[in-house]
Amino acid sequence: MSSTLRDLGDGLVLRCLRKSDLDSLEEHVKLVHGEWIDNIAQRLLDHYPKFSLEDNFVVIDTKVEKIVAYLCLLQRTFVLEGVEIPVGQMDIVGTHPDYRNRGLIRQLNELLEERAAHYKLQLLSIAGINYFYRQFGYEYASPMPMGLPIPTEAIPKLKEDEEEPITVEPVTKDTFPDYLACREKVNSFLDLYHEIGPEHFLFYSTGKLGEPESLRFFLVKEKDKVVGSFFFGKDFGNLIVKELWLENVQLVPPVLRFLKTKVQEYQCPLRIYPPSKPSLFPRIQRIAGARLSDSYAWYIRIPSIKQFLELISPVLEKRLACSEFKGVTDTLKLGCYREGFELVFRKGRLKMVNKLAIQEVKEMEVALPPLVVNQLLLGYRTITELQAIYPDVYCYSTKEGLVEVLFPKLRASITPSF
Ligand SMILES: CC(C)(COP(=O)(O)OP(=O)(O)OC[C@H]1O[C@@H](n2cnc3c(N)ncnc32)[C@H](O)[C@@H]1OP(=O)(O)O)[C@@H](O)C(=O)NCCC(=O)NCCS
């Protein structure tokens, strides 16, 4: 069967994954990413929604019949202020040490981009190593908090005459919809989040704890009423708790006491990740006696800024409608030096996004270097913040108000990571 997509010479061929490659792939993933990673590609193929062999790209060294470089494309949905955005995530990216710096990931990425275009994905994301993905048009454009370490000694003890007011129940396939209902409450505090559905349960809940995105979901109950939810996984030797939602802040100590039992069970330190209901984190920080430190960030690529702006036009219109620019008729020339766009607003509606000819791109009303523009469009930083950092970001004073309203800073959380 000849399914070679590219012949790279010297016995290297680039093609989609085949079932018969799975053993070689497992060996490759263990060698490149760590012995502890068990069968992740098989787990994804078995359980991840909308994921097939064609979404996996490999370079094979035909001289030794081995996979020497690999990456895959996962399809996800982000929700931006109510608008669903089809997103692709590049994942499990790796090259055998003997084959590095020969451009193999660059070539694999080109095929991934073609596949992403075929699926009409409007954003591409990756939680990646420092700098590397900038070379492929990605920019750090959404927050990735590092989590707050919680010393178990600091967790308030139950008094002798007290009983725990809650029980914490593991979520099953049948109760996953209850978890998702709680998750909506977490998401109600966010402008941008990763949407998951019942179809994701099997992927997240299979695999051993410690493997990528092998998670355990929980519901917190007071008598029979659901009053909270969270999930945990094991990552880099920590028990990491995310998507914590609790109906009231008094439930923080009992939940921490439950987590303390898990810390003892898994023998690893506890970290809790924001965001959650805004009132919860200050209480958790007080107990921990520490504050959140710096965060890393998600890399985001925007394959077509025009298409992205068109897709989020209801969001832009809603932002205008809630501002002093309600009903505005105006245009905005937004440039990123190598390309530019004219946003045409009529009576508060985004009528058109015109891509400008390169000669016109010199006369922009707001301009940002390519990729830095991703930070603005994804609400990672405001135009004012970007102007303070980058000398080549500018905005006409006559358009500052409009740009601030169109592109505010967003409360964003992209969990789970897969
Ligand atoms: C990072 C890694 C995937 C790069 O694979 P690779 O096949 O060597 O990558 P490529 O040769 O296609 O590199 C593309 C470009 O990035 C450069 N590059 C390679 N590794 C780099 C690194 N770690 N940081 C920055 N640039 C790097 C290459 O020189 C090349 O530049 P050029 O096109 O201008 O010549 C590989 O080193 C690896 O598997 N590392 C261990 C696992 C890992 O960290 N994976 C990423 C998880 S997010």
Image (cartoon, grey):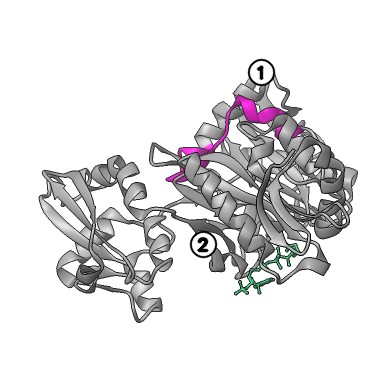
Dot 1: element = loop
Marker disc for residue 224: 1
Report the disc number at residue 141: none
Along the viewing direction, whichever of 85 and 272 lies nearer the viewer = 85
- At label 1, which amino acid type do we have? Asp
The structure residue drawn at horizontal position 28% and vertical position 47%, both measured from the top left corner, is 316
Residue 389 location (% of width, % of height) = 41, 77
In this picture, is 308 found above or below 370?
Answer: above
Query: Magenta part of the protein: which range?
Result: 186-205
Badge 1: how crowded within 10 Å, few (<14), some, or many (20+)?
few
Q: Residues within 10 Å of mark 2 (few under 14, many from 20)?
A: many
Q: Nearer the viewer, mark 2 or mark 1?
A: 2
Extreme-bottom residue of the structure: 391
- Which one is earlier in the sequence, the residue at label 2 or at label 1? 2
> Is residue 415 among what the camera can see?
yes
Residue 216: in magenta span: no
Image coordinates of residue 315 in percent, x first then y, are 31, 43
